[in-house]
Image (cartoon, coloured by chain):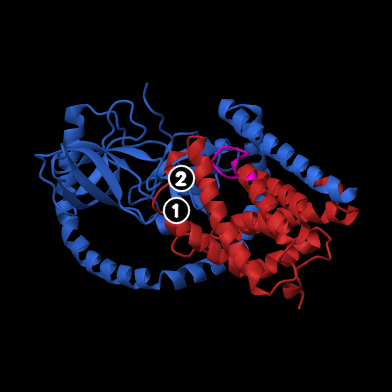
Chain colours: A red, B blue
Amino acid sequence: MGVAALTAEARFRAPLVVVTALVLHLAVLSRLRLFGVMPDLMLLLAVTAGLTGGPSAGSAMGFAAGMVVDLFLDTPLGLSALVFTLVGFAMGTVGTGILRAAWWIPVVAAFVASAAGEVFFALAGYVVGQTEMVTARLALIAPVVGLLNAVLAPLVVRMTGWALARPGVPRAFVG
Amino acid sequence: MAVYRRPRRQRFVLLLLVLTSVTVITLDFRGEDDGLLESVRRGARDVFAPVQSAADRVFAPVGDFFGGLTRYGDVKAENDRLRSELEQARGELLRQAGADRERQQLLELQQLTFAPNIPAVAARVVSDAPSNFQVTVSIDKGSDSGIAKGMPVVTGAGLVGRVADVSRTRSTVLLITDRASNVGVRLQSSGDVGVATGEGPRQPMRVDLVQLETKIVEGEPVVTSGLQQSVFPPEIPVGRVRSARVAPGALKQEVTVDPVVDLERLEFVKVLQWGSRP
């Protein structure tokens, strides 16, 4: 598992960050809506874990974040876990090339990955019978989630960098 | 050597996690309401409930402030609307007393199943759906308070939705604007029945099955039909007609209805302990 690649420090920190993010996601961010759309912090954890820790860390963090948030959704259990796992892996695969890039590139990466992740989530839901997830409103949800997650990205990338105990946090965010 | 092993291990991790996710999705689909996964889900919601309540108390002002900023135009427009409605309401109050008596007589005449004194559980709305794909709210009462899946949820103004999921201390309410929500309704003046389907947050509901010849007035009240096997008791206010039109070649009218309850700012609701009839 991806967990095997984590240091002892990270094995303690990563669950702490996932639970903290869950509390923020459920109690705070669900109230902060732009055009009725809230940011998706749990998806952003997967994105930033991929960027800072690589494909294994991204997929493992995505799986954990997705599975815990699934417990509080009425979509099928495991749906977010599946989507976030794949998004985390994808970001880990492309992320290694942009770690030392300009500060705005990871922000843009968070925007694109989050927007794509929402579309992917809706399509995956459609495939498993949640047909009401694919509507014209998706054209609003995807870019707004991308935008809100891009705003949160500098903070969350530090969180996941700390959680994974990786020195590989993008330099742009370190200062 | 490690250079070549690493991508293979990454792919193995990915495969394992994807397979686990797919297995859980499959088990969740096949599981019953009292199955293992559902129990885990309910347990997690109960365990998390006190944390969520505490966080909610701390962060509610932040959310309200942010919400006020993004809805400033709506709030101002609503304030103006409420002022004019208050004036109208004062005038309608006297007429309403007679209408209520008449309605009660009609109910008795048609022998509808609605009992005016349905037991109800008051609950506080603790959070919105943590998702952009569902229009639900979480309330602070669950099965310990006598709430069960499917029960109607109302405010003093009218219908809010129905209970979609219950744990011991929490319930999830599917709002009438959710796309998965269908409510059997009756147009109050014509008596025509139809089905009101949610179209998403802040969107009017769409009412299907209304006959072409039915005369519909803008602003006409729409109530639950309460037909046999309906999830909702009859005569609960649902909304007011926003528009009605007939598309060329259509066999039914296209009617849209604005919910009578302000679903964006729910604070307290009542769960009616009323089950669907066999």
Compared across the picture, whether A175 is left or right of B235 comes to: right
Residue A79 within the magenta-colored segment of the rendering:
yes
Q: Earlier in the sequence, mark 1 or mark 2?
A: 2
Instruction: Identify the residue under disc 2.
Output: A133
Residue A35: name its quadrant. bottom left
Determine the main secondary structure of the stretch shown in magenta.
loop
| Dot 2 amino acid type | Met
Q: Tell me if residue A35 can be seen.
A: yes
Q: Residues within 10 Å of mark 1 (few under 14, many from 20)?
A: some
Pointers 1 and 2 in contact (CB under 8 A)? yes
Amino acid under label 1?
Leu
Find residue B22 and report its horizontal and vertical position in percent. 63, 34
Q: Is residue A156 left or right of residue A135?
A: right
Residue extent of the magenta highlight: A72-81
Look at mark 1 in the image and give the residue it sits on. A138
Q: Nearer the viewer, residue B22 or B256?
A: B22
